[in-house]
Each structure stands twice: as C-alpha cells, then as structure tokens.
Image: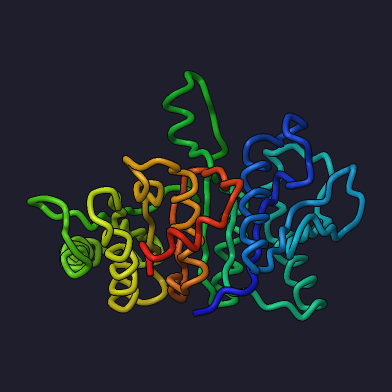
C-alpha cells in the first residue's frame, strides 16, 4: 500500500492558530510539525478544521505539500461543548469539498476525540486506514483532577474493549506468538457477543534497544491480526515504546511512524494506534539512516 495523500482532521483547533489562543496549544504545534515533516518526505497533507473568526482564506497552503481547509459549520466562536452536534455537518461538508476537488485519500489521521468521530466515519466510507491521536483522555483527566467533568459522549467514543497480545506466562517473542495470544482473548470476546468494531487489539511495541527486530515483529503482528480478523477490528500500540533506552527518541519515534506510512504497513480497514503526542524532529534526514531498522 502506497500512502501519497493523507487527511488530517483537527476539527476544534486550527493549525494556523497561535498557541495560547482559545483552545490552541501543544496539539497545534504537534500536528503542524508532523504534517510539515511528512510533507517534506513527499506526502500530500490536507488539514480539515472548522472555520474560525480570523480565517484568511478557506484554503491555505502552509508548507511543502501541506494545506489547511476550513469547513464552515456552526458559529465560528462556538463553545467546545457545542461541537459534538456539528460533527455530521462537518463530515458532510468535508465530503463535498473532497468531491469538488476530486480528492482521494490513502489514510486519515484525526486528533482529539471530536475529530476521531469524523475520522472513523470517513475511514469507513472510503475504506482507508484511520490513525487517531487523542492527546488527552477523559477518564485520565477526571481521575487526576478532582471535580473534573467531561461530556458523556466523549467517554463513549474513547472507551472500547482493548485486547492485548501479551500471554498468560509472559510477553510474546515474535509475531505468531502475538497472534496466538490474541486468538485466546478474541475467543472470550466472541463468546460474550462483543462486536469486532468495538475491539482494539494492542499488538505490543517493544524497544529496539533490546532487539533490533522488535520493530518488524510489531509490523508482522499487525498484518497477521488483520488477516485473521478482517477490516472491522482496530489495532493499537504504544508506538513510543520503540525508542525506549535510546538517544534521540523523538527522531526514532518519528521514523517509526513515518515508516508505517511510507512502507505501506498500514493495512486496509480501521487502524487506530493510540499515540502519545510526539514532537516532530527538526531533521527528518535521519529517516534514511534509521530506516534499515524497520525495513
């Protein structure tokens, strides 16, 4: 699978907005750096975000192969709690723009829980992989902040069944062992009538500082799981684990994620790694030097 064009969904926060204004913060910096790095590698990135009061143009080019498309739904300064009801209209307007431009996407990457709803629907309608970075989770926020309350819809979107590829007697040492462990858990899930669309399988990312083959083990496990359970099941992973114990962790994390895009390791169907917010490296030339680790 060759990934040439990606749709980035950042519904509630435009990457053009300055950090510190409204809901703009670290996520804005992260998504812009990530898109810039991928754009420099030759991938075409289209951001889809809500139109806001100081929009200069509906479509803004912000770097090599990177555009921001503003979707006009709801009041420009609508409160964050009011955005959930706007999601279907946002999706409809996104499709309208895509059809007008004749655009086809190979993958969708959504940010934050509101955008993940749009990304999920878009990925299913286009039959393309879906990557989501939640950046924050409602359950963690409410546990760490006394009196914190979140929209009920948020916990529904963020909470599903997570099945790990770990075994009863320890961690797997290769991809077939991961699949064997997953099969045992999936048997229990099936007997309890839980649909595949609500299941997220953690294929387990281990640090390459321990074994340089661990990166490939994860990729191979993803492909085995996808072949076994088809396009409905979701696949997750703590992708930042790959760089544990090594210098230049941000660069290695970026290479690992970029390798998934560039080498076609994103299988068809919903594919949702729950990623931590990683900073894009200032120099992506290291991709070539480190790429053999994951080749």
Q: Residue at x 61, y 46 (%)?
A: 282
Front residue (pair 145, 291)? 291
Can residue 89 be spotted in the picture?
no
> Where's residue 81, x and y in %?
67, 38
Front residue (pair 6, 168)? 6
Q: Residue at x 51, y 20 (%)?
A: 147
Front residue (pair 58, 287)? 287
Question: Is residue 132 shown above or below 6?
Answer: above
Question: Is residue 156 shown above or below 189?
Answer: above
Would residue 240 appear left or right of 136 to someone viewing this image?
Answer: left
| Position of the C terminus by quadrant | bottom left
Would residue 215 appear left or right of 88 to someone viewing this image?
Answer: left
Question: Is residue 89 shown above or below 176?
Answer: above
Question: Is residue 189 shown above or below 283?
Answer: below
Q: Quadrant of residue 218?
A: bottom left
Can residue 62 be spotted in the picture?
yes
The number of numbered badges drawn on the structure is 0
> Where's residue 225, x and y in %?
30, 71
> Where's residue 23, x and y in %?
71, 35
Would residue 23 appear left or right of 287 to someone viewing this image?
Answer: right
Colour style of the rendered protein structure: rainbow
Q: Residue at x 58, y 59 (%)?
A: 109
> Where's residue 10, x and y in %?
67, 51
Front residue (pair 270, 285)? 285
């Amino acid at each position: 699978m060759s990934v040439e064009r990606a749709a980035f969904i950042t519904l509630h926060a435009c990457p053009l907005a300055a950090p510190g204004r409204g809901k703009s913060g670290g996520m804005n910096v992260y998504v812009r750096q990530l898109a810039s790095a991928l754009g420099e590698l030759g991938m075409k990135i289209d951001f889809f975000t809500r139109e806001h009061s100081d929009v200069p143009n509906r479509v803004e080019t912000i770097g090599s192969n990177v555009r921001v498309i503003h979707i006009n739904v709801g009041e420009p300064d609508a409160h964050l709690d009011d955005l959930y009801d706007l999601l279907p209209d946002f999706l409809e307007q996104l499709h309208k723009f895509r059809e007008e431009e004749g655009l086809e996407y190979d993958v969708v990457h959504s940010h934050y829980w509101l955008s993940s709803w749009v990304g999920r629907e878009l990925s299913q309608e286009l039959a393309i992989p879906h990557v989501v970075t939640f950046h924050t989770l409602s359950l963690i926020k409410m546990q760490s902040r006394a009196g914190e309350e979140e929209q009920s819809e948020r916990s529904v979107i963020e909470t599903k069944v997570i099945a790990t590829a770990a075994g009863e007697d320890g961690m797997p040492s290769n991809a077939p062992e991961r699949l064997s462990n997953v099969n045992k858990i999936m048997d229990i899930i099936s007997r309890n009538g839980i649909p595949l669309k609500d299941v997220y399988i953690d294929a387990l990312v281990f640090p390459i500082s321990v074994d340089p083959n661990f990166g490939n083990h994860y990729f191979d496990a993803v492909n085995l799981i996808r072949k076994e359970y088809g396009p409905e099941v979701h696949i997750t992973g703590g992708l930042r684990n790959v760089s544990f114990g090594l210098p230049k962790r941000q660069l290695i994390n970026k290479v690992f994620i970029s390798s998934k895009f560039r080498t076609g390791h994103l299988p068809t169907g919903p594919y949702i790694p729950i990623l931590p917010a990683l900073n894009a490296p200032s120099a992506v030339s290291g991709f070539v030097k480190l790429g053999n680790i994951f080749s």
